[in-house]
Image (cartoon, rainbow, N blue to C red):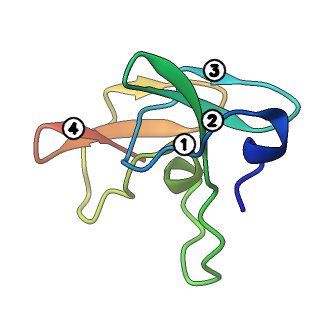
Amino acid sequence: ECFSEPLGVPCCTNNSPVYSIDENGLWGIQNDNWCGIRRNTSKNNNCFSVALGYPCCTNNSQVYFSDENGAWGIQDGDWCG
């Protein structure tokens, strides 16, 4: 079960980018509708960006942007944390 399902909103079925964050969790958009983004609960992955729907950088990527979540790089044409 996804946090959003009890709220009447389906869980995202793809790797949706995060469009909003509130007290319930992370929200994406799929098929022009809101969806809940499941947090990665793997204990082997401590990277902040996974919970936001983006992979960890696997190399020493240059930092292109920093925000309250952390430092962001670009890998394979997409953002990574």
Q: Is residue 56 left or right of residue 66?
A: left
- Does residue 73 sit above or below 55 in this rendering? above
Marks 4 and 2, how far apart at CA: 17 Å
**Mark in front: 4 vs 2:** 4
- Of mark 1 and mark 4, the one earlier in the sequence is 1
Residue identifier under label 4: 78
Q: Is residue 21 above or below residue 16?
A: above
| Residue type at tag 1 | Leu
List x then y, in percent, for residue 67: 57, 24
* Residue matched to label 3: 20
Circle number at residue 5: none
Q: Which residue is label 1 attached to?
A: 52
Asked whether, in this view, residue 16 is left or right of residue 19, the answer is left
Identify the image quadrant of residue 23: top right
Dot 2: few (<14), some (14–19), or many (≥20) neighbours within 10 Å? few
Amino acid type at circle 3 is Ser
> In the structure shown, which secondary structural element does the residue marked by tag 2 occupy?
loop
- Residue at 84% across, 44% down: 6
- Disc 2 versus disc 3: nearer the observer: 3
Task: Residue type at mark 2: give it.
Answer: Asn
> Residue at label 2?
69
N-term mark: 1 or 2: 1
Q: Nearer the viewer, residue 75 or 62?
A: 75
Q: Earlier in the sequence, mark 1 or mark 3?
A: 3
Proximity of marks 1 and 2: CB atoms separated by less than 8 Å: yes
**Relative side of 1 to 20, left or right:** right
Q: Which sits earlier in the primary sequence, circle 3 or circle 4?
A: 3
